Amino acid sequence: MKYFSREQPVNMKKRSIFYRKAEAFFRRFMVYGFSSSLPLYIVTEYPKSGGSWFSQILSDYLQIPFPRNRFPRFGSCIMHGHYLYFPTMRNVFVVVRDGRDIMVSYYFHCFFKNDRYNDQLVEKTRKALPFDDYSDIRSNLPRFIEYKFSVRKHPRFTWKEFVESWQGKKACFVKYEDLLKDTLQTAGKAIQEVCRMPVEKSRLQSIVEKYSFKSQTGRAPGSENRKSFLRKGVSGDWKNYFNKESKRIFGYHAGDKLIELGYEEDSRWADN
């Protein structure tokens, strides 16, 4: 049985407010109350950290549904979302990514429409930050970074707060950068840790290839398409867009987390 397919994105405009609220409530009800008994496998991330990609791989390998942007059934499935720590949650994968790369990726997602029907988010963010030229990313990024650390919307917490929420908790941390370098090894190790089962490497390898950036987009990693939810598929892109002010603002708000997560040895990155 094929549990996950490359389904057409859900048009968020066609879903009523009542439907969206009911779906969100039901998801929280399942995640906070039944993650152990169903069981659920929870993939939580700060937006644009690679959680959807990892969820696809996990769903296919475990052969359980991944209700992406859809009302989930009450049963075992992959529950992907943006969740802070809650003590009743079990079987949790925490997907983390360099927060500087997130700021760049999230900028594109917030200001440019893509194939994941992000129209409402674009409209709201452009209203909150009416830049003269949204394509001047290098100049606009400092203000956007400050906005994401001061205005708690989409999601209702900052990247730093997300990381702090899960540090020291019983959960499996999966780095986006490690997935890029060696998807098979990183995904296999995470599955073994959380699911407590041996991994069939040959089967996992075919799944990894199925959901690779090139397989899903027809582009090599680094080949950019700003109209795609899967825009570029690389790490370190922040270096192309951060200016001195972007470094200062991010360093002020969350520079310590870069060091704690191993992305930097010290704060000298902001001075270079």
Image (cartoon, rainbow, N blue to C red):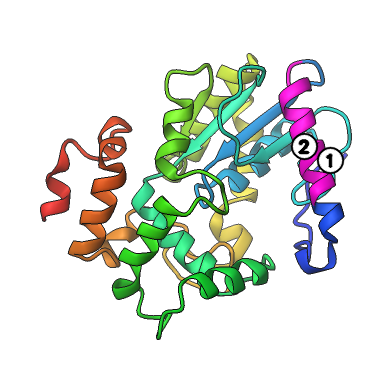
165 is higher (above) or lower (below) than 70:
above
Q: Are marks 1 and 2 in contact (CB under 8 Å)?
A: yes
- Relative depth, front residue between 254 and 204: 254
The x and y percentages for residue 68 are: 74, 48
Residue 65 visible:
no
Q: Quadrant of residue 260?
A: top left
CA–CA distance in space, label 1 to label 2: 7 Å
Quadrant where the N terminus lies? Answer: top right
State the SS at label 1.
loop
Label 2 Cα neighbours within 10 Å, binned few <14 / some 14-19 / many ≥20: some
Q: Amino acid at mark 2?
A: Arg
Residue most extreme to the bottom = 132
- Relative depth, front residue between 77 and 148: 148
Please give left or right for residue 81 compared with residue 168 in the image: right
The x and y percentages for residue 271 are: 11, 53
Residue under circle 2? 27
Magenta span covers which residues? Answer: 21-36
Q: Amino acid at mark 1?
A: Pro
User: Is 92 within the magenta?
Assistant: no
Mark drawn on residue 72: 1
Of callouts 1 and 2, which one flags the residue occurring earlier in the amino acid sequence? 2
Which SS type dominates the magenta stretch? helix
The x and y percentages for residue 23 are: 82, 45
